[in-house]
Amino acid sequence: TTTTAMRARPTNAPLGGGGFSSSKPNPPTSGEHAVRFHELAQREADAMADTMRSLNLGGQQRDVVAEKQQSTVNGGLETSTFTVAARVRPLSEQEMRQDNGNAFACVTPSGPGKGGRTETAAVLTPKINLRGVPTLEKQTFAFDKFFGADSGDDDLYVSLGAPLVKRAMAGQVGVVFAYGQTGSGKTHTMGGLLRRVAGDLFSGSNSGSEKKKRAINFSYFEVLGNNCQDCLVVATDGKKTQWGGTQSAAAGGAGPQPGAVQIGEGMDGGVITRNLSSHAAPDARTLLRLIDVAQSRRSTAATEKNATSSRSHGVGIITIGAEQFDSDSEQDPYGPRPGVLYVIDLAGSERSADSAKHSKERMDETKAVNLSLMSLKECIRARTAAAKPADPNNPNARPHVPYRRSKLTLLMKDVFDIECRRMCSTVVVACVSPSARDAAHSVNTLTYAAPLRVAIAATKDAAPLPVDPKDPVQWSHDRACDWLEEQIVHGNEKYASGVDVERILPPGSNGRELCSLPEPEFHKRLRAQIPGQMGAHLGKKTYDALWALIVDAKTRRRRPDGTVLTDEDEAREVRQAEEALAARSALWAERDKAMARGGF
């Protein structure tokens, strides 16, 4: 396949996509030192090219999402991972003509990072020192993957997009979102990724046979502050969607206007999206048409940096059903849950200097965008910290993940909730402009994104926590098979007496392989022996019970020395707490009686 590089901006396109002139002072690269800055940047680029060639790092393809799927410090299963990448677009034709043709790319690859599994990006910020000598201030940032200006959309999809599609097809949750300043290539990157997802889903290896074809549905809405709007709904009295999709109604009364999406939580803790249309995509052509329509309806407005800046977060949701079994009916209430892929194009971030000339409406929008971006950052860092084993000095303290703070993070509750009962993989793509005039923006973007990659490390010289015997990840093959037999066979002898649990967990496997088994594959192995609704029911019941154990192991309380509290210990603590509460209640009752008698 021919790799398609990011398209350079047209000749008449203004810098950053914007259509405004700026009264700001000229950057240092535009004056008498332009040639010298260009020479310094070229020298740096040549040195880095030699380093990359000597290390043979060019063109390597890595599944960085799989690399991040690693165990926690105490050997448990990490159910939600975050992969952070960065991408720099090429210089546009207008940018290359700036400074009398001496413009240079200020964001470049900077070799491998520490540990061998990271790649670094360097930002070269032009400055004039106190002696009037031009210099380039170099700052480096480490990422799981860095895509230079010569990388194409295919490169990004192979490394980041295809692994997420594979996981979503296995019933998991995949999230990818692009962050960066206006004009840095976010919409191009996410649009290219969505189109490749559409092609990949309907390729021969993924679409399945005609008899067992997957059900694929698409939704798209935009988020601005706490307001959400469906981009695939035409606001008519009949509440009909243009593309024939189904639209969920809001409970009670006349409900919101067509297209107004409501996001909340149900009584069971699950996320509910009301009034969001869902559109069947039986083929790639239909899905691509839906993508084009949805993206064309996003809200845009003129800003200091971009005449058509996206002022909202665009959220594409692709649900991918599992292949149906031969014995399935049209509706299978006990079948595997569909996988979900979220493709999110975040609104462009802006510095205060860029919003100085905004109207009040634009300022309010900028404030809402920046607040939601900060909430997203806090949620990712808190969820990463929550994956760390408890602090021995405070073993029962867990970081609070504030995913309810914004509609966007609430929608992604599965990613941030440590009690989520399926695997989640999230990819962050930080997009930056190569122009030296945007160096400050690029530094801000990479400063925001780079720390999201760093997992919270264990304290140095700290002893590993004692193994939790109830954690199914730690089970041997025999222990896992005993549990499967207890769940499937015992009490269901009439239907399951002939089940061979080693056909579900083959010899040589252990508890980790069992816990990592995708739900559709678990159902497939069980229902090959127990067909029909009984097999589906037992599959769902057993898989849910397994994930209940996984979540319990991640949230189980420990003593200050790290040992796990037994059931008897927990029962004793509950009893002691109830007795203490009863004693306090009796004391307050006596106090109230004394006050009534005037004793106080």
Image (spheres, rainbow, N blue to C red):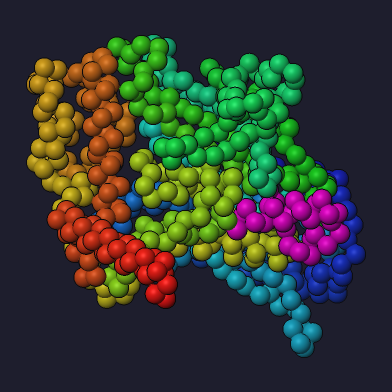
From where the camera sits, is residue 237 visible? yes
Outermost bottom residue: 131
Instruction: Residue 547: say if magenta.
Output: no
**Residue drawn at (90%, 57%), measured in percent from left and top?**
21
Residue 343 lies left or right of residue 214; in this view the side is right
Residue placed most toward the observer, 180 or 253: 253
Instruction: Residue 362: say if magenta.
Output: yes
Q: Main secondary structure of the magenta part?
A: helix
Residue placed most toward the observer, 125 or 40: 125
**Residue drawn at (27%, 76%), measured in percent from left and top?**
461
Please state the extent of the stretch shown in magenta in the rendering. 347-374
The C terminus lies in quadrant: bottom left
Residue 290 lies left or right of residue 161; in this view the side is right
The picture places residue 49, in percent across and down from the top left corner, at 56, 62
Which of the 4 image quarters holds residue 270? top left
Residue placed most toward the observer, 505 or 481: 481
Vertical order, 531 against 118 (above or below): above
